[in-house]
Amino acid sequence: MKRLASILFLLLAFNSAHAADLVVSNNAIIVFFGDSWTIDTSHSANVTGYRVVEYLHSYFALNYPTSNIAMYNGGRSGTTMDITLTNSIQKFGVPLWGYQSNLFQKIGFLSMTDNGGLGTNEMVNAVSNACLAPAVMSDGAFPLTTQSGYTATMRVQWVAVGEPPLEGSGPDTAQRTRNNATTNAGWTFGARGVDGWNTLSPSWFSDYTANGGTNVEWFASPGGHFASGGALSWAMAIIKGITTDTNISTCTLDWNSSTPSATNHCVVSSIANSGSTLTFTRHDDRLPMAFDVADGIITNDAQGAFNLIPGDASYFHFDLQITNLPAGNYSVAIDGTTVAASLSSTVLASGWNMFTNYSGPYWNQRKEVLGRIRDQRYVNRVTLVSGSAGDQVGEIAYGSAGGTPWDAGARGDLLIASNNAAVAKLQTNVTSVNFAATPTNHTFSITLNQPRFAPFRR
């Protein structure tokens, strides 16, 4: 699919003058198409995939808990994206989008990182071809084939995700050029583009120079693959590229008042003060995204992302602020579980951000949502190794079953109809994830810690 040279020339320079948030509606169906960085399971020493997309999925599930959003990982490993991506979109994505009502919003993420051999114009061409799906498609060769029926009129909002840096001290200028081309092509041919390289390169290159990339968690076989730290860092960059909304849920209370001073995306009720303890009930409209933190069972740990970009640890605001409280240190309990043993009155007065608090009912819920997302993929929650398609469970089975009518020549509307039963099996997984993400009431107890004095001795 050829494009005018003048258009391509304008796309050579990175364009960041786009700030409008991606609007996600009720019943949105999101499919992420990527490479081995998003799904790879072929390396026993480590698994780079099942992190980036899962963290991103948790953001959508927890940030839109009543919107019945479905998200699927259409990543794959092997070959080149310029040939495989469009086929993957048709083979995997079209039946998922086509199964639901035409009124449902359809969003596609394109992460074309395996296009390492393509120049700038070729990358733009590859993105533009992908953004034409599902109306047109390729069977691995050109020309593109025009579809008919519902498939021809189906509209997908495309987000082109630019490349993160490659392993090394940088700058990997070819990767940067592909990133810029992808980002700009996303804005031109899809709904939007997301910058990866320019956002992440300073911290990722510094990490490699300082300590061999410990926080990105590069691993040697094969080179250029990363684990949880890099995955969360990239997922955060993607989220920053689609929204400017950093507030999750915040509230401000006065120690001496039974009425909240301010609330945002939450409702606070039943405020009572016994003198040394303030109690109240909080119901949040939404919760922060989830990610892996080692806890004795879970061995993956994404906290390295916050060493790479410290501001990411406080990027989302999930805040509790209490003003006019007596000076001292306080313990915070939620539903009877202590989540902070000693917070200063200064911290509480300025606002305590619970985004990186890894204990108590909020974190347990976020962790369970991430676990059910892994269940939807049919991926072990601890090892992240996928199960067998022969078990007919989750997306592993869907990807396998969907190949049968595809290999038999089914395309477009026929492919949708042939996969309806397989897609229907996934709805139980989707319902399970969304149910786990539903916010509930929580009882907070903020208690002034009593000072301890050394025993009197003569």
Image (cartoon, rainbow, N blue to C red):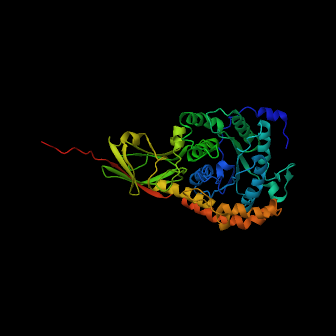
Please provide percent x and percent y for residue 308.
Answer: 54, 38
> Which residue is farthest right?
143
> Which residue is farthest left?
458
Asked if residue 207 lies left or right of residue 450, the reply is: right
Asked if residue 240 lies left or right of residue 311, the reply is: right
Asked if residue 281 lies left or right of residue 212, the reply is: left
Work out whether 105 lies above or below 199.
below
**Residue 326 visible within the image:** no
Please provide percent x and percent y for residue 342.
Answer: 36, 45
Instruction: Residue at 65% x, 67% y: name it.
Output: 391
Please provide percent x and percent y for residue 324.
Answer: 36, 41
Please provide percent x and percent y for residue 252.
Answer: 44, 45
Instruction: Residue at 72% x, 47% y: name it.
Output: 158
Q: How many marks?
A: 0
Which quarter of the figure has residue 21? top right
Closest to the observer: 147 or 386? 386
**Residue 385 visible within the image:** yes
Quarter placement of the N terminus: top right
Closest to the observer: 282 or 241? 241
Quarter placement of the C terminus: top left
